[in-house]
Image (cartoon, rainbow, N blue to C red):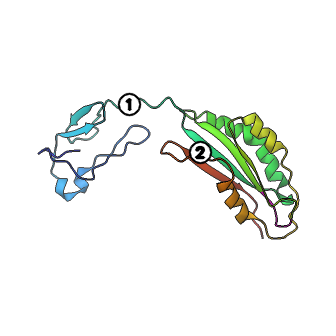
Amino acid sequence: MTAPDGTAVAGAAVTVTADGTARFLPALYPAFADVAGPFTASTADATSEFARSAGTVLTVGAPPPSATPVPLDVAFLLDATGSMGDEIDRLKETIDTVAERVAALDPAPDVRFAMTLYRDEGDVFVTSTYDFTGDVAEFRAALSRVVADGGEDYPEALDEGFAEVLAAPAWRRPTPRCSSCSWLLTRRRR
């Protein structure tokens, strides 16, 4: 962004929202309260000028959205102790719906699912991880083998579960276009 005399307005980065709207409010800054323009908006491919007015629509030759799906890694951290049977069954029943809703996003992301289970210290296992897969049927099959068991009021391995869900699955390398999230499924303890 440049001022009317052609000098750059330092720090005047503009954020465009998902619907293509950018808020332009120079009156918020005393040094620019009376500046009417013209203003210049540029991308790598085009430059457009505009004046300060309400509801100005400015079309700039922005590149079209990428046809490459946005990578999305979703890891579930599951309390697999005996009291969690109903919650685990509910996840088994709804994982297809979750996957369908994520796939219906526009643009559809390149989604992968993983899970880390944790139980009580001293149980058959403390943590166990199923690595990321983009195959929902494969993930559903792995989830179908999860059985709630153990949990005799020994300390739960939640800390170990958090550490493992962050370290064990093969998360994609973070980039501005890559999203990652982890959902914790547990019960409140009294």
Q: Are marks 2 and 1 in contact (CB under 8 Å)?
A: no
Q: Secondary structure under badge 1?
A: loop
Residue at label 2? 172
Q: Residue furthest left?
A: 5
- Which kind of residue does numbered mark 1 sit on? Pro
Query: Which residue is found at the position 44% from the left and 31% from the top?
Result: 65
The spot of residue 62 in percent (x, y) is 35, 32
**Label 1, residues with CA under 10 Å away: few <14, some 14-19, many ≥20:** few
* Quarter where residue 160 is shown: bottom right
Q: Is residue 31 above or below residue 175?
A: below
Going by the image, does 167 lie left or right of 48? right
Residue 63: numbered disc: 1
- Which kind of residue does numbered mark 2 sit on? Arg
* The N terminus lies in quadrant: top left
Read off the magenta span. 118-122
Going by the image, does 43 lie left or right of 118? left
Which residue is more in the foreground, 127 or 46? 127
* The C terminus lies in quadrant: bottom right
The spot of residue 17 in percent (x, y) is 41, 42
